[in-house]
Image: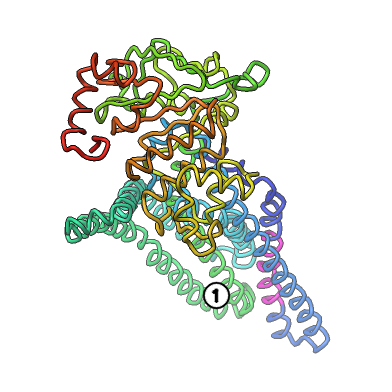
Amino acid sequence: MVIGKLVKSIRQFLPSTIATPLLVSGEVVLECTIPFYMAELVNRIKAGAGVGEIARFGGILTIMAIGSLIFGILAGLTCATASCGFGKNLRSDMYDAVGGFSFDNIDSFSTSSLVTRMTTDVTNVQNAFMMITRIAVRAPFMMIFALIMAFRLGGRMAWIFAFVIPVLAGTLIAVASRAMPLFRRIFRKYDRLNESVEENITGMRVVKSFVRESYEQEKFGAASEEVRRDFTKAERILAWNAPVMQFCLYTVMVFTLSYGSYVVISSMGLDFDIGQISAMLTYSFMILSSLMMMSMIFVMITLASESAARIAEVLDAKSDLVSPDPEVAAESVSDGSIVFEDVSFAYAGNPDNDVLTGINLEIASGETVGIIGTTGSGKSSLVQLIPRLYDTTRGTVKVGGIDVRDYDLTVLRDSVAMVLQKNVLFEGTVADNLRWGNPDATLEEMKEACRLSCADEFIDSKEGGYDYRIDHGGANISGGQKQRLCIARALLKKPKIIIFDDSTSAVDTKTDAMIRKGMKKYIPETTKIIIAQRTASVADADKIVVIDGGRIEACGTHEELLNNSVIYREIYESQNKGGDDDGRA
């Protein structure tokens, strides 16, 4: 159940959550009792009460007003504490859930959708929670209490509410039933709108280089217009609340004043008196304002219910990649040997289309293995099975002689470092980013890793050196500099296995060769897997695996493949055709 899942996020703010409705109840009791004493005071004054009696009533009313104010202030404080704390916990729970997602989970949610759920949706649910803990208690409690007092003071005149309340209730039900489907549609369009923004900001250089600003603006404008149109429809429906509420309010006022005045005059104040009319008007305002607050709550809950369902989808998503029971899980990776036994793999979104088929491959610990193949041949998918970013569809992947599914995920992934083609750096200093590889790395260790990755050249030229601050996403350094920093970060980890997924594509061939040479000396016992587009990057590997269409087409040394593999020879010859340095394109 959605509510049950969200309630778990209250946790340490439960005392404030419970205290809020209790304080609100005290505020309402005093607030609703005041008109009763006011009516009694008016009647006593009319009957000729003395100063002492008036002062006594005045003192009681003052104490009740101060008490109501104190209850209200305390309720506001506890409500703010509870709702803001609930929102914080809910965001944290969602963030933790996303952090535990497998790649399959992440593939099922777009980034923009997750951002919308953790911002807009959480805000909607937080606002609804705030209204539920305070106003949702205050409004019905005040309405019931005011109705009891109204019938006690007004008698048959209070039956006007039997006409007004059903009208308002019917309006609320009709509004909610029509608005809810619109809100569901709006949130889906919000995801697409945010996705368009994310896509354009990420690809701003491409948009500008192809002069497509006008096209993208039109596309964004169309998506924005769809959201506006649906929101307008929803707001038009919700707008019925206010006029219907005003109609009922003025109907009650006119009836109370006209009929009440008639009863006072006709009975000479015996059946009904001025004090009672005053109290009835006050209770009328209380009842109708309570209904108005309830309509606001209804609208907010209508809006928040869809947000709550979207949040629950994230919290419900369970990773299909879980660690085995700690009692049976392998506690360490003995070495960097890797074995693929009849491995096939397909992504969850397209289970009938195998990306890898019948892969059999043995890699000895400490070997340097090159992987080469055409775009889309399955190279990256293959290496992502090693740290268990995905699970095989069929077959087994072993690391250190043990099935990767038998390792604790943290143990396995701590033994594998990956350097991706799309390098990711985080906002902070150079040292902060390097310490992702080893939180305890000394400055000397960082300098050594950066020297091996050829990153020291540009770091030394930056103001502050290793304290130089990198902007969000590494926007203030070049692609090649990012790649070299990411290589240094991986080297600091000193893993059993290090995987380079086309991670030197942004550096020149000379630097590429220097990095490979440095790695051999720095981590000789580490298994090194290099995915590359350039044959020069893998030419000196112990063996090279050629992948084509998700299958291993050939495996051997550079010289062996030139003689035995048509695909490898074609790649090599195409890159050497221009006669560039080392014959690489």
**Percent position (x, y) of residue 232?**
29, 60
Question: Horizontal placement of 148 versus 191: left or right?
Answer: right
Residue with the mark numbered 1: 263
**Percent position (x, y) of residue 482?**
42, 49
| Magenta range | 24-40
**Percent position (x, y) of residue 239?**
36, 63
Local crowd size for mark 1, using a 10 Å CA cut-off: few (<14), some (14–19), many (≥20): some
> 434 or 255: nearer the eye?
434
> 369 or 340: nearer the eye?
369
- Residue 31 highlighted magenta (yes or no): yes
Q: Is residue 171 above or below residue 244?
A: above
- Residue 218 highlighted magenta (yes or no): no
Residue in view at x 56 percent, y 45 percent: 448
Q: Amino acid at mark 1?
A: Val
**Percent position (x, y) of residue 334?**
60, 19
Task: Say whether residue 28 is visible.
Answer: no
> 84 or 40: nearer the eye?
84
* Color theme of the render: rainbow
Q: Is residue 474 above or below residue 409?
A: below
Prevailing secondary structure of the magenta residues: helix
Task: Say whether residue 99 is visible.
Answer: yes
Q: Quadrant of residue 113?
A: top left
Q: Is residue 535 above or below residue 26?
A: above
